[in-house]
Image (cartoon, rainbow, N blue to C red):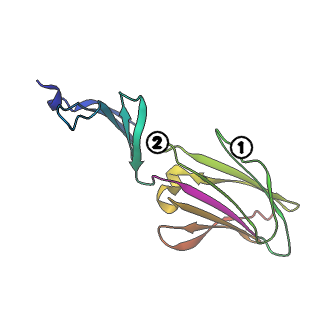
Amino acid sequence: MDPCSKVLLLLLFLGSSCLCLCFVPSVSGAEQLSNETVILFGPKVVIWSDDTKSVLEAGGRGNGRTTVHIQNRLGGGKNLSVHCKSKDDDLQPQTLAEGQEFVWGFNPNVWGTTLFFCNLMNPTLNFVFDAYDYKRDEIRCSSQCIWLVAAEGMYARDEAANLWTYMYPWSSS
């Protein structure tokens, strides 16, 4: 069997995700390509070059840069302290005056496990929430995740449906 007919090398099922490895063999002539491995992991596609030992392309649903916005709309001139982190990044505490927002951007990882969580604080509020969770937000806000912090609770912008959703009420205790 020639190597071109052996396209699928490995297929593993990992829960609801699928990991597939394929080899794209070299071709001869002026259009010679390098040996490449195509990895399909969940909704993502990665092309690995054996020649350059690097990722040539990564993509899939929800690929590209995602920006998160946390807007202080508490009213009454109240400041809001925001401290956001991921497993790998600490975005440092920020203080937002009424009407200001905290914005950061990132590229979701290829495994679909990107998670940023934030602690919101002021004299009457101490609340922790997931500002970005790939599993929840891949479709809802693939490029712009906007959170509005209001006196009654938090709203999230659903980019896909083009509407605001009341997500988290503040506890009355």
Which image quarter holds the N terminus? top left
Q: Provide residue 67's location: percent of width, then percent of height.
A: 59, 58
When the figure is inspected, residue 106 is found, relative to residue 155, above or below; the finding is above
Q: Decide whether residue 124 is among the magenta residues.
A: no
**Distance between mark 1 and mark 2 Cα atoms:** 20 Å
Residue found at x 26% / y 35%: 33
- Work out whether residue 158 or residue 66 is closer to the camera in this orientation and state it: 66
Residue found at x 20% / y 36%: 30
Identify the secondary structure beneath mark 1: loop
Identify the image quadrant of residue 3.
top left
For disc 2, the marked residue is 110
Q: Residue furthest left?
A: 1
When the figure is inspected, residue 114 is found, relative to residue 137, above or below; the finding is above
For disc 1, the marked residue is 90
Within 10 Å of disc 2 (Cα), the crowding (few <14, some 14-19, many 20+) is some
Q: Earlier in the sequence, mark 1 or mark 2?
A: 1
Which image quarter holds the C terminus? bottom right
The residue stretch that appears in magenta: 63-72
- Work out whether residue 137 or residue 61 is closer to the camera in this orientation and state it: 61
